[in-house]
Image (cartoon, grey):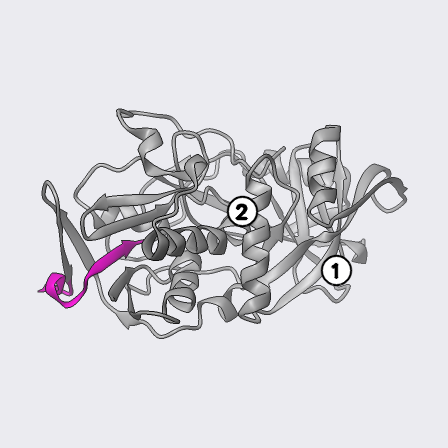
Amino acid sequence: MKIGIIGGGIVGSSLYRILSEKHEVKIFDASVKTQFPTLIHSLLLKDCDVELASLSLEFYKKYKIKRMDFTSYTIGKVGDDLISSWTEHGVSVKETYVDWIGDKALEAKGGDSLVSIKDLTEVPKEKAKVGVLTSEKKATVKANGKDITGDFDVFVLTAGGWNSNIIDQRIPLKPYYCWASLMKGHRRELDKFIVYDYVLGFYSRPAIGIGSPLFIAGDGDIIEMRPPEDGKARKPEIKDRDLVISRIKTRFESRPIYVSGNFCEGTPDMRPVYGRLKDNLYLVGGLNGYGAEVGPGMAMLLEMMIDKGEERRPYMLDRFNGVENFDLGREPHEL
């Protein structure tokens, strides 16, 4: 089968690696996106998302994607059901007092890592601006103005926050801007551990991972906006920037160096989605700010749908049938 993938980010690159084992696959990507060098992969999620993150971990190991494992600390109340779910998936969890945090926390080992997004997305791509026009049953796909519909058996739309810019059909997805701040602190532990602070409402993670004074932190409000059509980076006004940074500084003595962000994409229930849009078009989207956790897992689910007809109901597209308007909620990796 000839498969065209529209979008070469986390899911598109994961799909390329998986589907290329059996099919002829090509990625089309406008190359307008910026990627953080590393992103968090965590098993410390909720409900069936833990299983999805576990699938992603299998993917990283199979394809030898570079990762650095880190111990994490979760501050705030966590239900016994969540802890049981984490331990069932191989995470070692215990409550302890952490001197450099100045509070009690759940120490988790075997549940968190930083994934090299550069390593993951280094697959062959053709630079092209793609447009998708839909009819009742089929999609017409053009790359740089050329109709390539007949060159492929099926296409997969997986361009993240850019999906809504590419397709003419209304889909149950909304793009938004998510951001984080590079911080410099006095605690070198902040470049050695991941912290989820549900008391003050932020996360921190290593910037380099060698015990430098630098760390990355964030968890501001979702800023609904579409990516620019021309691909030029534009930062929106971040209204809660000072508030979020003040929370970080309340817990850890530090100062911001610079703020950076990227476009994410959410669904009505803030969970990922996949399925068949048209006879020749599949969709994978709505990673909701936790793409490194669930993106490769979603790619694995789509491969099972294409090759075996298997469906994973909690993430299927048809759960949004009849949904016209919706507001984005809280990112689901937050407890």
Which of 223 and 109 lies nearest the eye of the viewer?
109
| Mark nearer the N terminus (2 vs 1) | 2
Does the magenta run of residues contain 200? no
Farthest bottom residue in view: 124
SS type, badge 2: helix
x%, y% of residue 78? Answer: 73, 30
Residue type pointed to by label 2: Leu
Q: Is residue 261 visible?
A: no
x%, y% of residue 79? Answer: 73, 28
Label 2: how many Cα within 10 Å (few below 14, some 14–19, many 20+): many
What residue do we see at 73% from left, 36% from top?
A: 84
Residue type pointed to by label 1: Pro
Q: Which residues are magenta?
A: 143-158
Quadrant assignment, res 314: top left
x%, y% of residue 263? Answer: 40, 48
Location of the C terminus by quadrant is: top right
Does the magenta run of residues contain 157? yes
Label 1: how many Cα within 10 Å (few below 14, some 14–19, many 20+): many
Location of the N terminus by quadrant is: bottom left
Identify the mark at residue 291; answer none if there is no mark.
none
Q: Is residue 242 above or below residue 180?
A: above
x%, y% of residue 62? Answer: 56, 68
Identify the mark at residue 52; answer none if there is no mark.
2
Identify the mark at residue 213; answer none if there is no mark.
1
Q: Is residue 236 visible?
A: yes
SS type, badge 1: loop
What residue do we see at 55% from left, 53% from top?
A: 55
Q: Is residue 23 above or below residue 326?
A: below
Q: Is residue 220 above or below residue 302?
A: above
